Amino acid sequence: MILLPAIDLYGGKVVRLTRGDYREMTVYRDDPTAQAGDFQAAGASWLHTVDLEGARDGTAPNFPAVAAICRSTGLKVEVGGGIRSLDTVDRYLQAGVERVILGTSAVTDPDLLAEALARYGEHIAVGVDIKNGRVAIRGWTETAEGTVEDFFARLCGLGVKTVICTDVSRDGMLGGANCGLYRALSEAFPLDLIASGGVSGYGDIDALEELGLYGAILGKALYTGAVDLSRALEGRR
């Protein structure tokens, strides 16, 4: 299982939200490139980034920060948040991003997802954020119609390979990962599933690995010191 340290971006800074609430934002660092460099020095090979402003507004104001990380590190970078056109996908991939995550657009514009998959294949992933049993969109401010299971089935039908799945209720809470959710999804759908939200310590990482997941994202636990990235990566580099 790969571990992906996370950098959430707002105003060009490294921040974390609590349960996706933009009113509950903590700034951890002013320099995202330096933070990414520290993760690389600790042994990370992948980096998960989210443009929080983009996720909410459908824009890409933190593109320069992501591009700078790609230029300055050897990390494989995945990015999500506000990517709702092929032009934005193109920009990120040309900047050196390894994997572009479609979230809201995967729900509201399935034709865009299909075209992106046709053009870029495994460089396209889908972010499925689950809030109150529904798929959350537009920076977790709205939820879509239909069930989570139906949406996952559609993704499989389109040929999606990688899904980043976030339990919004646990994001930023350090309350433990929702292993029951990830177990059910991994057993039901043939996807490379990346768990996100709630990882609070090494026990959560071990539990997710036991499920056979492709990856897990580490966010707030790294910034609070609950998890040391070097230690977590031992045996997983």
Image (cartoon, rainbow, N blue to C red):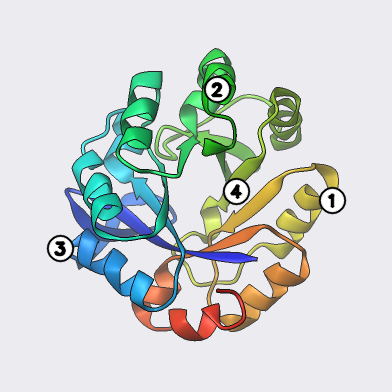
Q: Position of residue 235 (x, y in %)?
A: 62, 81
CA separation, marks 3 and 2? 33 Å
In this view, which residue lies farthest toward the top? 111
Foreground mark, 4 or 2? 2
In the rendered image, which quarter is residue 28 located in?
Answer: bottom left
Q: What mark, if any, has residue 30 been given in the picture? A: 3
Of the residues shown, which amino acid type is indicated by label 1?
Answer: Glu
Question: Quick one: quadrant of the C terminus?
Answer: bottom right
Q: Are marks 4 and 3 in contact (CB under 8 Å)?
A: no
As measured in the structure, the alpha-carbon distance from the residue carrying label 2 to the one carrying label 1 is 24 Å
- Tell me where residue 109 appears, x and y as whole percent: 52, 17
Whether tag 2 and tag 1 are in contact, CB under 8 A, the answer is: no
Q: Amino acid under label 4?
A: Cys
Q: Which residue is mark 1?
A: 187
Above or below for 117 versus 133: above
Residue in view at x 40 percent, y 75 percent: 222
Residue 113 marker: 2
Residue 136 drawn at (x, y percent): 52, 37
Q: Is any part of residue 91 visible from this angle?
A: yes
Mark carried by residue 32: none
Q: CA distance from mark 3 to mark 1?
A: 40 Å
Q: Residue at x 59, y 19 (%)?
A: 114
**Whether residue 132 is visible:** no
Badge 4 is on which residue?
165
The answer to which of 68 and 212 lies nearer the viewer is 68
Residue 36: where, in percent of width, then height? 30, 64
| Callout in the foreground (2, 1) | 2
